[in-house]
Amino acid sequence: SILDAAFVEFSDNGLDGARVDAIAARAGTTVRMIYYYFASKDGLYRAVLEHAYAGIRTRERDLGLEALPPAEAIRRLAEFVFDYEEANPRFVRLVSIENIHRAAHIARSETIRALNQTVITTIGAILARGQAQGVFRRDAEPIDVHLLMTAFCFFRVSNRHTLGTIFGQDPLSPALRARHRGMLVESVLSFLRGGGTDSVAAGEPGART
């Protein structure tokens, strides 16, 4: 209950603006109890980050991607990321807040780094299967695919208000949802099916042939 209350407080107000007494009141506990468990406000914030990342990574592991054909596994993962980030804007805000702090708290958490390695391992296994079957390009890298997959999902949530104000169209409008979800899947699969071993990073370090 403390972690859930702190997740709301930190994502709404940032690390500096969050109040431990407000978290205690929301959780139905005391400030003293929070410090007993987490030692400090920074310690609680780091625990919230760990809890938040564990949430999305656990859900990803439950998708059963290893049982799906490679292209279908990528489709399922992309659709999951789209749905999850749209349904959890506070998670997106929390990640944005940690970026403001230049990932200082994530850098002190072995738990978060281990948690997030799982998605790269998962994507890598899918790519390897697709490459072995000749359906995915051979130069695709797991981290690149992760970036491609998450960038659009994250941006439409994190920048919803600026985009909506500037362009007069809410990117999270239900009228746009199916189109945007389809764009994401098509973009990722189109890249992976590009086929050329040298078409993205010819001559650059890390390119594989």
Image (cartoon, grey):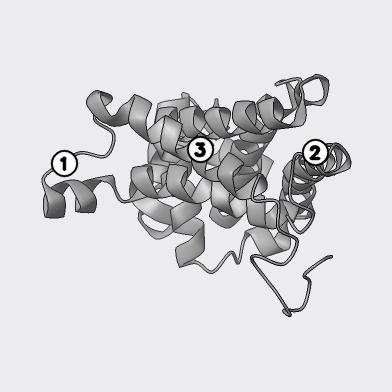
Q: Which residue is mark 3?
A: 186
Q: Which residue is mark 2?
A: 130
Q: Earlier in the sequence, mark 2 or mark 1?
A: 2
Q: Earlier in the sequence, mark 2 or mark 3?
A: 2
- Amino acid carrying label 1: it is Gln
Q: Nearer the viewer, mark 2 or mark 1?
A: 2
In the image, is 80 to the left or to the right of 123?
left
Q: Nearer the viewer, mark 1 or mark 3?
A: 3
Name which residue lies at 70% across and 28% down: 73
Q: Secondary structure at mark 2?
A: helix
| Along the viewing direction, whichever of 35 and 99 lies nearer the viewer | 99
- Circle 3 packing at 10 Å, graded few (<14), some (14-19), many (20+), is some
The N terminus lies in quadrant: top right
Q: Secondary structure at mark 3?
A: helix
Name which residue lies at 82% across and 66% down: 208
Q: From mark 1 to mark 3, how far is it between C-alphas?
A: 22 Å
- Circle 1 packing at 10 Å, graded few (<14), some (14-19), many (20+), is some
In the image, is 92 to the left or to the right of 173?
right
- Circle 2 packing at 10 Å, graded few (<14), some (14-19), many (20+), is many
Q: Are marks 1 and 3 in contact (CB under 8 Å)?
A: no
- Amino acid carrying label 3: it is Glu
Q: From mark 2 to mark 3, how far is it between C-alphas?
A: 16 Å
Q: Which residue is mark 1?
A: 169
Q: Give the vertical position of 5 relative to 200 (above or below).
A: above
Q: From mark 2 to mark 1, how far is it between C-alphas?
A: 37 Å
Q: Earlier in the sequence, mark 1 or mark 3?
A: 1
Image coordinates for residue 189, horizontal then vertical, percent: 60, 40
Image coordinates for residue 196, horizontal then vertical, percent: 71, 58
